[in-house]
Amino acid sequence: MLDSRPACSLDQRIMTETVSLRSTEQPPLAVLVQLFQGGTLRSAVRLAGGELIVGAAPECHLVVTDDAVSRRHLRLTLAPEGALAEDLGSRNGTFFLGQRVGQLTLTLGSRLTLGKSELRIVADVADFEGTQGQKRVSYGALRGQAPSMQRLFTLLGRLEGSLATVLIEGESGTGKELVARAIHDHSSVSKGPFIAINCGALDRALVKSELFGHKKGAFTGAVTDSIGAFEAADGGTLFLDEIGELELEVQPVLLRALESGEFSRVGETKTRKSRVRLLSATHQNLKDDVTDSRFREDLYYRLKVVTLSLPPLSARTEDIPLLARHLAEQAGYPPLPEAIALRLAHRAYPGNVRQLRHAIDAWAAIGELPEADTLPTSALDAVLAQLVDPKRPYAEQKELVVDAMTRAYLKKLIDSTGGNRSEAARIAELQRGYLRRLLEKYGLAGSAEGGSGDGDEA
């Protein structure tokens, strides 16, 4: 049964039809199949289950008036990634990225060419935004009772049947990586790897290598073949934090990898394949970066198939006692006294949950809360204020600070595990081969040689 409703406001009437949903416990997100001709949106059909037939015949769900389109040209069915497309033996074929295809799983945002017409597979955002769920106080490692968190938990639950690309927005310290981890853990690829990369911490000269790997001899220091994050995440999730910091020249390479699942290591011509569910996060306004030509518009829309916005702690102060108790328990500290929890609830946290955690660490160490202006974030601000030189370029100084932080973190991490790289990689939530490359880059590889479980992946 098909139900019609307006798809969008245009001069001509465009209708969106709904294909009825087969009953499943965790269905993928519904999609809109949009028909474009001559760059103009002609019609759109909503697929929420069952099958959708595309063709020139009037009985098709999506009728395409195009001499090169067969009467029954294409079948579309829902898939966790977006939709499964199956050519029905059409006369002139179905094309994806310039290649004729018979059957193909399409991620949301993909485009198919049928004759002179184009089909776009996009998320039905209205369906996602209308999601309703039961009240809960947790989702994975996330905690919260505020309305904004209840909505977030509901949306996360709706994503469980989908492998859609998700852009996570929020201030620093709001828990964007925790959200990414929760999405992965509740998805159909949860048994696959979860690889997290901070784009802002990548060496500008080695970004492509870190993401896609390199061949031995590709550049100075490339003494062995090495896989990158995209390949390491095959069959699982790749989380790119601070995606707005990704170098502009690397963005088209990432876009191509997302569209086709194909990439090449630096220094080789061989095409490799990796099936990856991509999650990304930013504290920036990527739309502004697109306007200022600092971020590619086509990649931006590919990343924001679904957007989740995380509230700052200042917008959910009622959650602070609950969060504080959870953080103390998580760290293995004694139960947080009620008086301390209440005092924490009356503080400001410009650093969000991360700053709250620092305050709890301080309480556990000295048995009392430090003054608000002596929390670790303020101490860090004081140190940075002494180091910053306003006469030197921003990018240069940022790289120096990131390098110093990374080196200090790695040294303490390796020292705390007695040189055990396997344990260090687990704590840091990094792929072991990637950790090895970081240790080599910062001259710390020797400090990890004596630990157990030290074998690295190729």
Image: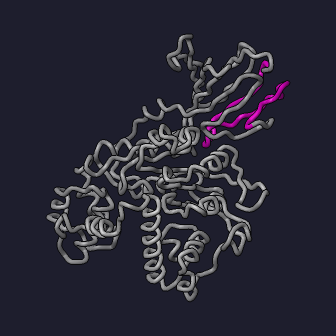
The spot of residue 157 in percent (x, y) is: 46, 45
In the image, residue 155 sits, relative to residue 214, either above or below, namely above
Q: Measured along the vertical axis of the image, is residue 17 above or below residue 233?
A: above
Is residue 86 in the magenta section?
yes
Q: From the image, which quarter does the C terminus lie in?
A: bottom right
Q: Nearer the viewer, residue 264 or 319?
A: 264
State the count of labels: 0
Residue 19, horizontal then vertical, whole percent: 60, 24
> Start and end of the magenta stretch?
70-97
Query: Split into 4 quadrants, where in the image is the N terminus?
Result: top right
Side of 223 where 277 appears, left or right: left
Expressed as whole percent of the image width and height from the top left, the position of residue 12 reads 56, 10
Query: Residue 432 occupies which quadrant of the picture?
Result: bottom right
Report if residue 429 lies within the magenta region: no
Instruction: State whether residue 153 is above or below residue 51.
Output: below
Instruction: Say whether residue 135 is left or right of residue 231.
Output: left
Camera sees residue 161: no
Q: Residue furthest top?
A: 12
In the image, what residue occupies the spot 62% across and 17% down? 42
Q: Is residue 252 left or right of residue 126?
A: right
Q: Residue at x 51, y 19 (%)?
A: 8
Q: Residue at x 60, y 22 (%)?
A: 44
